[in-house]
Image (tube, helix red, strand yellow):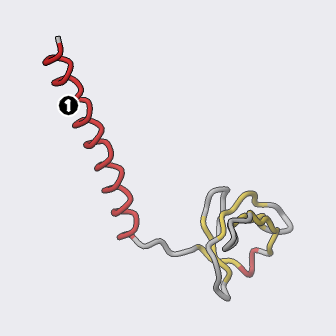
Protein backbone atom coordinates (compact mmCIF):
# COMPACT_ATOMS: atom_id res chain seq x y z
CA UNK A 1 0.00 0.00 0.00
CA UNK A 2 1.49 3.31 -1.10
CA UNK A 3 0.37 6.13 1.24
CA UNK A 4 1.02 9.85 1.06
CA UNK A 5 0.14 12.78 3.35
CA UNK A 6 -3.53 13.65 3.07
CA UNK A 7 -4.72 10.10 2.43
CA UNK A 8 -7.55 8.88 4.66
CA UNK A 9 -7.02 5.52 6.32
CA UNK A 10 -8.72 3.45 8.97
CA UNK A 11 -7.53 0.80 11.39
CA UNK A 12 -8.14 -2.69 10.03
CA UNK A 13 -9.97 -3.38 13.30
CA UNK A 14 -12.29 -0.39 12.70
CA UNK A 15 -12.71 3.02 14.30
CA UNK A 16 -12.59 6.64 13.17
CA UNK A 17 -11.05 7.68 9.85
CA UNK A 18 -7.46 8.89 10.25
CA UNK A 19 -5.61 11.36 8.03
CA UNK A 20 -2.04 10.51 7.06
CA UNK A 21 0.27 13.33 8.16
CA UNK A 22 3.62 11.73 7.35
CA UNK A 23 4.93 8.43 6.04
CA UNK A 24 8.19 7.20 7.54
CA UNK A 25 10.29 4.05 7.57
CA UNK A 26 9.04 3.03 11.02
CA UNK A 27 5.35 3.77 10.50
CA UNK A 28 2.68 6.17 9.41
CA UNK A 29 1.95 9.29 11.44
CA UNK A 30 -1.80 9.87 11.54
CA UNK A 31 -4.03 12.62 12.93
CA UNK A 32 -7.72 12.53 13.81
CA UNK A 33 -10.34 14.39 15.80
CA UNK A 34 -11.76 12.79 18.92
CA UNK A 35 -15.44 12.94 19.80
CA UNK A 36 -14.81 15.98 22.07
CA UNK A 37 -13.00 17.88 19.30
CA UNK A 38 -9.51 17.05 20.57
CA UNK A 39 -6.81 16.54 17.93
CA UNK A 40 -4.81 13.31 18.25
CA UNK A 41 -1.56 12.37 16.55
CA UNK A 42 -0.01 8.91 16.61
CA UNK A 43 2.53 6.91 14.62
CA UNK A 44 1.11 3.53 13.65
CA UNK A 45 2.61 0.54 11.84
CA UNK A 46 1.57 0.25 8.20
CA UNK A 47 0.36 -3.32 8.86
CA UNK A 48 -2.61 -2.11 10.98
CA UNK A 49 -3.95 0.41 8.42
CA UNK A 50 -6.03 0.21 5.28
CA UNK A 51 -7.31 2.86 2.88
CA UNK A 52 -10.69 4.16 4.05
CA UNK A 53 -13.47 3.60 1.56
CA UNK A 54 -15.15 6.82 0.47
CA UNK A 55 -18.83 6.92 -0.37
CA UNK A 56 -19.27 8.48 -3.82
CA UNK A 57 -22.73 9.72 -2.77
CA UNK A 58 -21.14 11.82 0.01
CA UNK A 59 -18.75 13.45 -2.46
CA UNK A 60 -21.59 14.29 -4.85
CA UNK A 61 -23.61 15.85 -2.02
CA UNK A 62 -20.65 18.03 -1.06
CA UNK A 63 -20.22 19.17 -4.67
CA UNK A 64 -23.93 19.97 -4.92
CA UNK A 65 -23.76 22.02 -1.72
CA UNK A 66 -20.76 23.95 -3.02
CA UNK A 67 -22.43 24.69 -6.34
CA UNK A 68 -25.60 25.80 -4.60
CA UNK A 69 -23.70 28.34 -2.53
CA UNK A 70 -22.16 29.92 -5.62
CA UNK A 71 -25.56 30.25 -7.27
CA UNK A 72 -26.96 31.90 -4.15
CA UNK A 73 -24.07 34.38 -4.15
CA UNK A 74 -24.78 35.26 -7.78
CA UNK A 75 -28.46 35.85 -6.98
CA UNK A 76 -27.53 38.12 -4.06
CA UNK A 77 -25.28 40.18 -6.35
CA UNK A 78 -28.07 40.49 -8.92
CA UNK A 79 -30.46 41.72 -6.21
CA UNK A 80 -27.86 44.27 -5.04
CA UNK A 81 -27.42 45.53 -8.62
CA UNK A 82 -31.21 45.91 -9.04
CA UNK A 83 -31.47 47.78 -5.73
CA UNK A 84 -28.67 50.18 -6.71
CA UNK A 85 -30.38 50.85 -10.05
CA UNK A 86 -33.64 51.76 -8.33
CA UNK A 87 -31.91 54.03 -5.80
CA UNK A 88 -29.94 55.90 -8.45
User: In the displayed image of the protein, which residue is found farthest to the bottom?
Assistant: 13
Quadrant (top left/top right/bottom left/bottom right) for the C terminus: top left
Quadrant (top left/top right/bottom left/bottom right) for the N terminus: bottom right
| Element at label 1 | helix
Mark 1 packing: few (<14 Cα in 10 Å), some, or many (20+)?
Answer: few
| Pick the front one: 68 or 22 | 68
Q: In the displayed structure, would residue 45 be above or below residue 8?
A: below
Residue identified by numbered label 1: 79
Q: What is the quadrant of residue 20 in the picture?
A: bottom right
User: In the displayed image of the protein, which residue is found farthest to the front?
Assistant: 87
- Residue at (31%, 56%) from the top-left corner? 64
User: In the displayed image of the protein, which residue is found farthest to the top?
Assistant: 88
| Pick the front one: 21 or 71 | 71
Query: Measured from the top left, where is residue 86 in percent x and y?
Result: 13, 18
Q: What is the quadrant of residue 72 in the picture?
A: top left
- Residue at (77%, 66%) from the top-left corner? 40
| Pick the front one: 74 or 18 | 74
Query: Measured from the top left, where is residue 12 in percent x and y?
Result: 66, 85
- Residue at (66%, 74%) from the top-left corner? 35
Left/right placement of residue 39 relative to residue 6 reads right
Query: Measured from the top left, where is residue 47 in percent x and y?
Result: 74, 80
User: In the displayed image of the protein, which residue is found farthest to the left?
Assistant: 86
Amino acid sequence: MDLKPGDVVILKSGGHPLTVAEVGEDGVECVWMGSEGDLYRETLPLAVLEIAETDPDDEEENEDEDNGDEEDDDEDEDEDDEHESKVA
